[in-house]
Amino acid sequence: MHNFAKATLIALFSIAITACSSKQGEDLSVNKSSPDVLYSQARTSMELGNFSKAVRSLEALDSRYPFGPHKTQVQLDLIYAYYKLDDPASGIANIDRFIRLNPTHKDIDYVYYMRGLVNMQSDSYMFHDMLNIDRTDRDPKVAQDAFKDFDRLIKSYPNSKYAPDAAQRMQHLKNRLAKYSINVAEYYIKMNAWSAASTRAQSVLETFPGTPSTERALEIMADAYSELGQDKLKENVLTVMKANYPDNKYLTK
């Protein structure tokens, strides 16, 4: 083996041993620390943006001192740390546990807000957003859950400081869910399922009014009613289109 290759292997082996030793030493320190020291370490890690390390300290606190002086704040910090680590499964599990155990806590509005954020995070694809790739055709389940979370926050705690941001996020989610329904309707068109296409497009008008997908929904309905020979319904759709989208190309057909 060449000397360079040997040196590289030795260096890598040394790094691995050092990292392992460091981790073992850190775990030993966590196991021996008092609640106050552990919580101080967790807060310092969070402030430095080291959420993985913060989670280790917070989880140690949560398991070893479940009735300690920082118990509820530890749970709240864990929720935020999991969110920052993009770990929605752990985030939702801790959120639901907090709600079950602390339904009247003074920060319960924040917890519902975080539930919406975590679900919304699950629905987002960072690299698709960066590359401007439209993926509104993906399963909308978590987007629907996020919408319900924000809706519950606003209805139950209208004066919450998180309500205005939740309302803005709900609008974004409405646009996303409406676009998904349009994608489904367009699939029905490809399958010549005109009745199903019109029904799905109509649901956009009823469930997500005022979204950018409204105009496309009307176009789909006009096409579907034309194919189905429902001239009166098509005429009604064109009347609505003329009142709201007078420059639409369908009005010149």
Image (tube, rainbow, N blue to C red):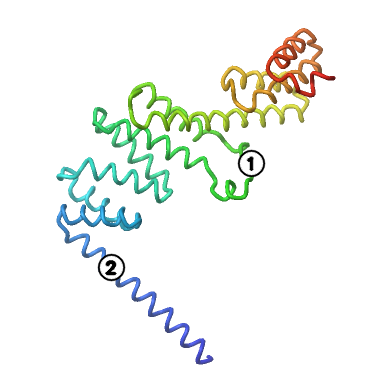
Quarter of the image where the C terminus is located: top right
The label shown at residue 134 is: 1
Q: Element type at marker 1?
A: loop
Specify which label sits upstream in the sequence, 2 or 1: 2
Residue in view at x 33 percent, y 43 percent: 79
Residue in view at x 72 percent, y 14 percent: 237
Q: Which of 151/210 is in front?
A: 210
On the picture, is 248 further left or further right than 147? right
Q: Element type at marker 2?
A: helix
Q: Which residue is mark 2?
A: 24
On the picture, is 80 further left or further right than 220? left
The label shown at residue 77 is: none
Location of residue 38 with respect to 236 vertically, above or below: below
State which mark lies toward you, 2 or 1. Answer: 1
On the picture, is 191 further left or further right than 86? right
Q: Residues within 10 Å of mark 1 (few under 14, many from 20)?
A: few
Q: Amino acid at mark 1?
A: Asp
Q: Amino acid at mark 2?
A: Gln
Location of residue 185 with respect to 44 vertically, above or below: above
Location of residue 245 with respect to 129 vertically, above or below: above
Q: Residues within 10 Å of mark 2 (few under 14, many from 20)?
A: few
Q: CA distance from mark 2 to mark 1?
A: 44 Å
Residue in view at x 30 percent, y 70 percent: 22
Residue in view at x 66 percent, y 28 percent: 182
